[in-house]
Image (spheres, rainbow, N blue to C red):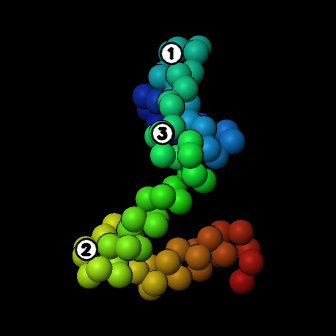
Amino acid sequence: MTNAGVRVEMRPLEFLSVQCRGERKSLPISPDEIDSQFKPGLHYQAEQLIGVLNGQATDLVSLEESVRSMRLCSTIYGLN
């Protein structure tokens, strides 16, 4: 992803690097320790699911939002 001031790359998806405009070197961003122990994001998703099961508010998207996003991706890639 690139904007006016920064370029952000995930290559491969598990690793993030940031390059500021006008600089040649990109800076690697270290993954969270928990994401080094498990598949990145899995622990967070599991925590959110436990929150749902306990009746707590979470950051998870609704099923409707998820379906809408999948349909959008399908349209973008011409899979309809």
Residue under numbered circle 1: 22
Please identify the quarter of the rendering in which residue 12 is found: top right
| SS for callout 1 | loop
The amino acid type of the residue labelled 1 equals Gly
Q: Nearer the viewer, mark 2 or mark 1?
A: 2
Give the residue furthest to the right.
79
Residue in the picture at 39% in, 65% down: 47
Residue under numbered circle 3: 33
N-terminal of the two: label 1 or label 3?
A: 1
Q: Pointer 2: residues within 10 angstroms few (<14), some, or many (20+)?
A: few
Residue 65 in the figure: left or right of residue 51: right
Quadrant for the N terminus in the image: top right
Q: Pointer 3: residues within 10 angstroms few (<14), some, or many (20+)?
A: few
The amino acid type of the residue labelled 2 equals Ala
Q: Is residue 5 above or below residue 61?
A: above
N-terminal of the two: label 2 or label 3?
A: 3
Residue in the picture at 48% in, 21% down: 21
Residue under numbered circle 2: 57
Residue situated in front as seen by the camera: 50 or 75: 50
Q: Is residue 46 above or below residue 7?
A: below
Residue 49 at x, y percent in the picture: 41, 73
Q: CA distance from mark 1 to mark 3?
A: 31 Å
Query: Are the residues at dot 2 and dot 1 in contact (C-beta closer than 8 Å)?
Result: no
The amino acid type of the residue labelled 3 equals Glu
Residue 33 at x, y percent in the picture: 48, 39
Asked if one can make out residue 7 in the rendered structure from this viewpoint, the answer is no
N-terminal of the two: label 2 or label 1?
A: 1
Quadrant for the C terminus in the image: bottom right
